[in-house]
Amino acid sequence: MSEFVTTRREGRMQQIVLDRPKALNSLDLPMCQALHAALDAATADSGVEAVVTTSTSEKAFCAGGDIRALRDAAASGDHETNRTFFSEEYAMDLAYHTHRAATVAVIHGVAMGGGLGISINGSHRVVTKKVMMAMPETAIGFIPDVGASHFLPRLCGGGARGVAVGIYLGTTGVRMNSADALYTGLGTHLIDNDDQEAFVAAIGADGLDAALERFGLDRSEAGESAVEKHIDRIEDVFSRDTAQDMIAALEAGEQDEWATATLEMLRAHCPTSIVATIELLRTGADAADLRECLDNELKLGAWITARPDFVEGVRAVVIDKDRNPTWDPADLASVDVAGIRSALVGS
């Protein structure tokens, strides 16, 4: 089904391998369909105790969806092609979440966007010490999707803190290391960079629990988490009512490196995407389950990719790489909040 996805049965596990290194394992439609088919096959095999997703790339677990192709479709007005892709991708993400067996992602290198969809929605997110995670969609005129409206507001134990952390990560697209992943709950376990193959082999031979006992490291070995260091400020700032209030709180507070970097990201990213992300994550915090969140993301995603900001954002960040997009509207106060809310199923 896809030359970039292979799967094999090894002892107690079904291993799924992402093998599109030149594109950092960016997901296209056939890859999503192949992943879903592999999950279905593992469901039918009663001997499979764990489904383990890995990558052949030293640089990336999965850098997200094939944004260029999605942008080309949007630019040509072919919104049905994009809807098909997102529908298939989200169905696959849900299959990871609801699988009867443990779903384990071994995350090394870059994991962004769709790469978090095939990992965070699973039961075990095993990170190495060399990880860079992010949900950078607001920088390209899109929204955090692939279940992000379910898992982001539930980080750090959920509640008001979880929603604030989710909004911080989702609006800024800030990059996280393995310590951040483990602190927030995006990651569940830590292993050494060089132990990936041995860890996966141990799952097949001895089972998941035994492999984690043998190779798992204490969280402290990941180093310092910037999210943990600034958690009180994150909760204070990103619990404010509006994006404008959040920016005002940052401007009124201590102007250190964290505040400066956070302000730069919020000012540079798409205003409509920032407001849409806040609305989406707050709705997701109250959603009944992942399926409801994915339905919201599909509807809001269709609304936002039909706008010019998505085509312009991908041009500026991915194609021309001038990082100088022209957003429409260019300011937060002019964003169509009513349009965003009308596109949310749970609103």
Image: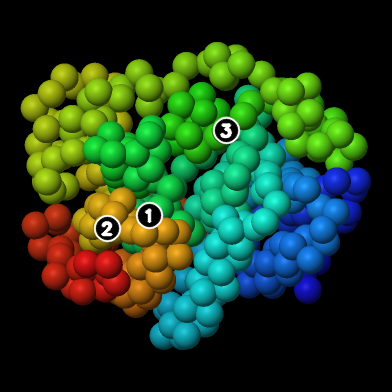
Q: Amino acid at mark 2?
A: Thr
Q: Residue 283, which numbered label?
A: 2
Q: Is residue 105 above or below residue 299?
A: above
Which residue is labeled 3 in the image? 188
Q: Position of residue 20 (x, y in %)?
A: 73, 56
Residue at x 74%, y 23% (from the top left corner): 213
Q: Where, quadrant-wise, is the N terminus in this rendering?
A: bottom right
Return the residue nearer the eye: 198 or 83: 198
Q: Is residue 75 above or below residue 241?
A: below
Query: Image check: 36 left or right of 139?
Result: right
Q: What whole-number distance in Å separates the C-alpha atoms at marks 1 and 2?
A: 8 Å
Residue 310, visible in the rendered structure: no
Residue at x 34%, y 45% (from the top left corner): 153
Q: Is residue 16 above or below residue 221?
A: below
Which residue is labeled 1 in the image? 149
Q: Residues within 10 Å of mark 2 (few under 14, many from 20)?
A: many
Q: Amino acid at mark 1?
A: Ser
Return the residue nearer the eye: 256 or 217: 217
Q: Earlier in the sequence, mark 3 or mark 1?
A: 1
Query: Image check: 319 left or right of 62?
Result: left
Q: Earlier in the sequence, mark 1 or mark 2?
A: 1
